Image (spheres, rainbow, N blue to C red):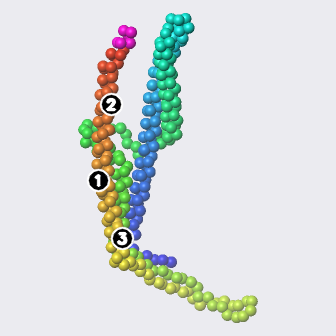
Amino acid sequence: VRLPIYDPASKERDKAYRFEATASKAEMLAVWEGYAARAEAERLESRGWEAGADLLQQRAAESARLLADAVRGYRNGLVTQSRLREAYDQWRFYAGGVMTASARASLAQGWAGLDQAFGRARPDQRAPSRIDTFQDAFDQAASAARGLSELEARRQAAEHMTLANASRIQKFYADLFIGWNITATGVGWLPSFGITGVGITPILTFELKTDELRDLQVRQGQGQEAYFRQAQTKLEADLAVEFYRQTVAYGQAGRQAALIQSDLLPSLQAALAAS
């Protein structure tokens, strides 16, 4: 039987292990969210290719009709060879575009089907919220970043492990050996047995480590803690740059869509109606 008497490092080690488990969970959730984002991007890509295929399908049908008219006109000597070639090239462009868009849409939909299990809502997933300023948006994005949570948990784990390794006395315990003192007398096949009492033997044990090993482990833990703190700072800077870049790209895409909707489409529709 082992009886612990003094164990100063066990509590700090337990805390370090709990923080390591939290960091591993955050890392797995980050991978999960990456797959979910990829599945959503694949679904949106599939919708885009399907819309493109539908639009090209209309043009392909019209170009097929024009190609048939050009073939008949060429047979009757009413259409030149260059006009027939132009009609064929136009039909080939739209027909090839329809096939390419349909194939890409099917491929993206297939990948989205493989990753759709990761797109389900999780119990810890946040509900949509309203933001008023750019700083509020970045604060929400940073607080939801799994990488920052993981690094913070690993930093705290390194801190507690450093405290656990800071003591030279690791453990002080007593081992109790309990047994029956049994004697045997006599010769032959049937000796006689007797019990003389119960024996209890205590053995005290210290687990020590040298000053050099303690200093080495403490410096190693301090170095890991500083590393994770610097990694947090770098990740926050990277998040800020990426968030700003995506915000600018989103705003530019919105302005382009508005210009196409208000200026380009009306002019193209007017030109099509005039022709």
- In percent of the image, x 73 and y 89: which residue is there? 190
Residue 219 lies in quadrant? bottom left
**Residue under circle 2?**
253
Q: Main secondary structure of the magenta part?
A: helix
Residue 222 lies in quadrant? bottom left
Q: Which residues are magenta?
A: 270-275
Amino acid type, callout 3: Gln
- In percent of the image, x 40 and y 59: which residue is there? 20
Taking the magenta stretch, the answer to whether it contains residue 173 is no
Quadrant where the image shows the C terminus: top left
Percent position of residue 60, x then y = 49, 18
Residue 90 lies left or right of residue 187; in this view the side is left
Alpha-carbon span between mark 2 and mark 1: 30 Å
Q: Would you place residue 48 above or below residue 164 in this image?
A: above
Q: Residues within 10 Å of mark 1 (few under 14, many from 20)?
A: few
- In percent of the image, x 25 and y 42: which residue is there? 135
Percent position of residue 98, x then y = 50, 24
**Residue under circle 1?**
233
Alpha-carbon span between mark 3 and mark 2: 53 Å
Does any portion of residue 5 appear in the rendered image?
no
| Front-most of residues 275 and 40 | 275
Judging from the image, what secondary structure is the residue with disc 3 in?
helix
Q: Residues within 10 Å of mark 2 (few under 14, many from 20)?
A: few
